[in-house]
Amino acid sequence: MAKPGTQARRKRSAPELPFGGAWSYEPSLESTDHVVLAERYGLFLDGAFVRPSTGRYFATSDPATGRQLALVAEAGPKDVAAAVVAAQRAFRSWRRLPGTERARYLFRIARLLLERAREFAVLETLDNGKPIAETRDIDVPLAAQHFFYHAGWADKLDLVFPGAVPEPLGVVGQIIPWNFPLLMAAWKIAPALAAGNTVVLKPAETSPLTALRLCEVLQQAGLPPGVVNVVTGAGATGAALVRAEGLAKVAFTGSTEVGKEIQRQVAGRGIDLTLELGGKAAHLVFEDAALDQAVEGVVRGIFMNQGHVCCAGSRLLVQESVHDAFVAKLQRRMARIRVGNPLDKNTDMGAIHSAQQLARIEALCAAGRAEGATCFQPPCRLPERGFWWPPTLFTGVAQSHRIAREEIFGPVLTVSTFRTPDEAIEKANNTSYGLSAGVWTDKGARILWVAERLQAGVVWNNTYNRFDPAAPFGGYKESGFGREGGRQGLRAYLRLPDAPTPA
Ligand code: NAP
Ligand code: MG
């Protein structure tokens, strides 16, 4: 019997895309699944795929093999302006649609995503390099959950914010990074649409394919043209979107550096802005913690998605009395991490996303060695083609070392020690970032004491890197402002003249 989802997908004919013949990409080795890719992808404007006014296309490729997957349209300022106009036109009727109707579209999108889950998982793994076990179990189901969750709010906005008449903002320009391409698109689009806004989304240059495939799902769901528009391109396309006339809000997820530039561009224009930026999370292990479980949590915290995670637990702080025992356990566990073919369901760590990201990881690891920290990497045979880096651990790390201060965004963990809870807090907060943190201890009272004092938007207790659409996510300090998820995330897409901000 065919697996659920596979059958439905095989019955569908190849996606109707405007350019060239479709070709079937057969993923190598373990995977037997097929993903049908077009040779070229147009921009998704006003409900249809169209050619870019620039006439230019760029290649997106598989980081695990270097193989080109498809050509993707490069949107110029004219295309971005056309997308905003389409979104403005769609906004007039979308905002007036009863919430129950908007909810229906969002439910349909969520269901279609789950029906096509295998296809999305394989495509995300191909375009991004992350292991199929993650795209299958985390990225795709969570993306669908975001649509389900926000569908549930769409007709209850007045109940969420009592005493106010919630109004959508208008057209929202949304810019997302390459590390969770589909999930970030869902995080942005679902709350915006539930609240009655329309969207122009700019995916990252190096991982645009699942956002474009999501546009096929939007067509399949019958979403009215112009409600969501996708303009592909590089940083210049993102910058054109930020500058475009007619936006009510910009929502950005990406690096702190680009976030600051966007903040300057938006200043004084009377439009809303939320920024989800970088992080350098502290992961605290107290001597009373269940150490074997903590090892698993620390491994998930830093090696998930090759460490390309804004909230990765990249600074491990271990209580001095258990440091040696904990590091020994961690090193033994790291030796069992399977690095390799992302399409193999047994793979734990896939490919580094790009040559540029690999160069950054190499440079920072070299700086760690030069500054005197001790580097541990388990023996590990890396594939010859593509971009790879083994799981890496630095011990003897001082607070002043670059590897302890800068976001590496790779599978690299630094370890330092603390003696007292006060020292743990001081070291954990000694960073310009404040996105997330983790704490492992057996004492409930200590969890609360620590969580209250950590300057981080999310604090995980005795677990790490768990996500739920109902839980607000966002940063302090240079990790940005605004929240995504939960009522607070919905709030960020509404104008509520009289309402108190939800606690
Ligand atoms: P990035 O360079 O800031 O890029 C993010 C997005 O912005 C991409 O779509 C990028 O386009 C676009 N962009 C680049 N320059 C721009 C400009 N001047 N104006 C407007 N848009 C511009 O970040 P990245 O390297 O892709 O992603 C990694 C960073 O994202 C890390 O710092 C990570 O911590 C952060 N991140 C944060 C969160 C969070 O929720 N806080 C989540 C995930 C990632 P191109 O890629 O096409 O150049
Ligand atoms: Mg790619």
Image: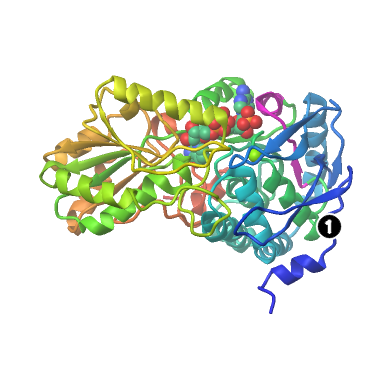
Residue 138 at x, y percent in the picture: 52, 57
Residue 310 at x, y percent in the picture: 45, 39
Relative depth, front residue between 238 and 275: 238
Relative depth, front residue between 329 and 425: 329
Q: Residues within 10 Å of mark 1 (few under 14, many from 20)?
A: some
Question: Where 456 falls versus 407 (above or below)?
Answer: below
Q: Is residue 214 magenta?
A: no
Q: Magenta residues, as a range?
A: 227-243
| Colour scheme in use | rainbow
Residue at figure coordinates x 81%, y 68% from the top left:
11
Residue type at tag 1: Ala
Instruction: Tell me: 93 left or right of 367.
Output: right
Residue 95 at x, y percent in the picture: 74, 50
Ligand 2, image quadrant it occupies: top right
Residue at figure coordinates x 20%, y 43% from the top left:
318
Residue at figure coordinates x 31%, y 29% from the top left:
404
Q: Is residue 237 magenta?
A: yes
- For the N terminus, the image quarter is bottom right
Label 1 belongs to which residue? 14
Question: Where 138 falls versus 371 (above or below)?
Answer: below
Residue at figure coordinates x 45%, y 37% from the top left:
389
Q: Within 8 Å of ligand 2, the CB of disc 1? A: no
Could you tell me if residue 499 is visible in this image? Answer: no
Residue 455 at x, y percent in the picture: 32, 38
